[in-house]
DNA sequence: GTGATTGCAAATCTTTTGCACTAAA
DNA sequence: TTTAGTGCAAAAGATTTGCAATCAC
């Protein structure tokens, strides 16, 4: 899997969702998807864009991350109040959160086997299951 | 299980943690633990206190919720960026999040059986595992 | 052109903090 | 009387929004 594939796939997906390939969105897609699976905050991405010489406002970063998430290209991971991570791996999987640092590590969905899920209340359907293992350094 | 038991237990626990039983903390313990398992935000608790005629500042609500969490009397549950729930059930269990409303429902730990947890990275130990089933109304 | 997108600054929301005042031990 | 706790108002973060200027189609 090269860095180009997911990049192209993401672009096509955006097109399908009616999102115009603006200079900002192209740059952000590149930053997000050319380096494998990652977990970024809006602020981190903003700093990365700046470091790469791309001028994008923080408001646009937020808009873009939210649109990408709605389009299914990104997945939002909430691990602590007041900070959202956006995961470039949008497929089903789980996470390890390293507590002092806030670092996120992917776990394949197969790494956590839930053998019994509870009956959901009447009239409710499962949209997604999140498992977070909170760990600390010994 | 009456409403009084967990209330008393919580008080004892606070004492053990060196927290003085002030008027505000007593009122909050009562509000939190006299009505079974609940999930409240700081703001909700603040409103409840006001409705009950108890004057407590929001700052004190936050201080108190954090101290109670540190003391192990409450458990913080993060399901969406920018909002923390405090769960009066501090024992091991998981949650269903009803998406449009934000309502939280407890699942006993036994309701979700994780049959295989991944090997943790070297030098890391598990502190806690959170499972959230995100559901929507059909 | 026309409607979508961007950037800026202001607004919002949640949570924390500094500090003078009050209450518990 | 000594130390912890409280309340207020301000500060701090993260995220959203209103609106004029700009860009893609």
Image (cartoon, coloured by chain):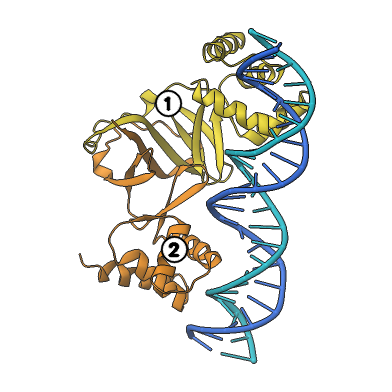
Chain colours: A orange, B yellow, C cyan, D blue
Residue B120 is at least partly visible in this image: yes
Residue B29 rendering spot, x and y as whole percentages: 63, 18
Q: Which chain is home to disc 2?
A: A
Q: In the rendered view of the protein, which quadrant contains the N terminus of chain A?
A: bottom left
Q: Is residue A123 visible?
A: no
Circle 2 Cα neighbour tier, 10 Å, few/some/many (<14 / 14–19 / ≥20): some
For the C terminus of chain A, give its image quadrant.
top left
Q: Are marks 1 and 2 in contact (CB under 8 Å)?
A: no
Kindly identify the residue that appears in the image at 26 percent across and 71 percent down. Answer: A4
Camera-nearest residue between D2 and A121: D2
Distance CA(mark 1)–CA(mark 2):
38 Å
User: Could you say where residue A101 lies in the image, as x and y percent from the top left?
Assistant: 37, 43
Residue located 41% across and 60% down the image: A72
Report which quarter residue B59 is drawn in: top right
- Which circle marks residue B93 in the picture? 1
Q: Residues within 10 Å of mark 1 (few under 14, many from 20)?
A: some
**SS of the residue at dot 2?**
helix
Q: Quadrant of residue A48?
A: bottom left
C3 vs A133, left or right, is: right
Instruction: Please tell me in which quadrant of the rendered image residue B47 appears.
Output: top right
Indicate which label's residue lies in the foreground, 1 or 2.
2
**In what element is the residue under mark 1?**
strand
Please, is residue B30 above or below residue B60 in the view?
A: above
Chain ID for label 1? B
Q: Which mark is residue A47?
A: 2
Q: Position of residue A71 (x, y in %)?
A: 44, 63
């Amino acid at each position: 899997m090269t860095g180009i594939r997911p990049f192209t796939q993401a672009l096509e997906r955006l097109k399908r969702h009616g999102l115009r390939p603006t200079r900002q969105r192209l740059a952000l897609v590149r930053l997000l998807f050319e380096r494998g699976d990652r977990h970024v905050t809006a602020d981190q991405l903003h700093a990365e864009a700046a470091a790469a010489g791309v001028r994008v406002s923080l408001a646009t970063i937020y808009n873009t991350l939210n649109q990408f998430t709605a389009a299914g290209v990104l997945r939002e991971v909430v691990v602590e109040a007041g900070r959202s991570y956006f995961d470039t791996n949008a497929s089903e999987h789980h996470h390890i959160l390293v507590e002092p640092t806030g670092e996120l590590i992917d776990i394949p969905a197969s790494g956590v086997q839930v053998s019994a899920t509870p009956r959901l209340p009447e009239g409710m359907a499962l949209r997604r299951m999140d498992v977070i293992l909170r760990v600390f350094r010994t």
